Image (tube, rainbow, N blue to C red):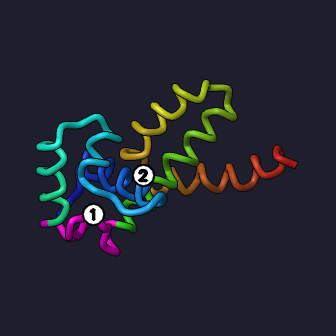
């Protein structure tokens, strides 16, 4: 099953929320500002695709966790990178959210390596 941007966003949200404990569909709906029926439908599709388990709480499967971590890493690194370039935090976060789903693995790896090499030195 190929994930669309919305599926990736749900997985990333569940990943972020799970850092503070168990995650319910209601938590996802509140965090994302979506209706409970919309979240229920998305959760069903993610479960059917093998990305999510649901037994009262939402738990990412190994493949769901892989996708969520990938998207979360992209979001955080791109946000920080844009802020370092002079973009305000709110705009940087919004732009990173758009970019994280469409950027190729090759381009992201190049940005990541650039950040590793150049921004580390800037922090010292």
112 with respect to 30 (left or right): right
Q: Which residues are magenta?
A: 48-64
Q: Position of residue 66 (x, y in %)?
A: 39, 67
Residue lying at the far right of the rendered structure: 124
> How far is disc 1 from disc 2 in space, using C-alphas?
29 Å
In this figure, which residue is indicated by the disc labeled 2? 104
Q: Position of residue 37 (x, y in %)?
A: 11, 43
Q: Nearer the viewer, residue 113 or 52?
A: 52
Dot 1: element: strand
Marks 1 & 2, CB-CB < 8 Å contact: no
Q: Residue 52's image quarter?
A: bottom left
Q: Residue 35's image quarter?
A: top left
Is residue 16 magenta-colored? no
| Residue 58 tag number | 1
- In the image, residue 24 above or below residue 76: below
Foreground mark, 1 or 2, reads 1
């Amino acid at each position: 099953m190929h994930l669309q941007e919305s599926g990736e966003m749900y997985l990333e949200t569940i990943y972020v929320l799970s850092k503070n404990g168990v995650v319910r569909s209601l938590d996802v709906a509140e965090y994302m500002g979506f209706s409970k029926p919309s979240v229920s439908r998305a959760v069903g599709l993610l479960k059917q695709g093998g990305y999510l388990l649901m037994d009262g709480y939402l738990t990412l499967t190994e493949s769901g966790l892989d996708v969520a971590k990938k998207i979360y890493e992209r979001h955080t690194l791109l946000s920080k990178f844009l802020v370092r370039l002079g973009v305000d935090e709110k705009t940087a976060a919004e732009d990173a959210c758009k970019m994280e789903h469409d950027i190729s693995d090759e381009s992201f790896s190049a940005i990541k390596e650039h950040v590793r090499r150049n921004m580390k030195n800037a922090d010292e």
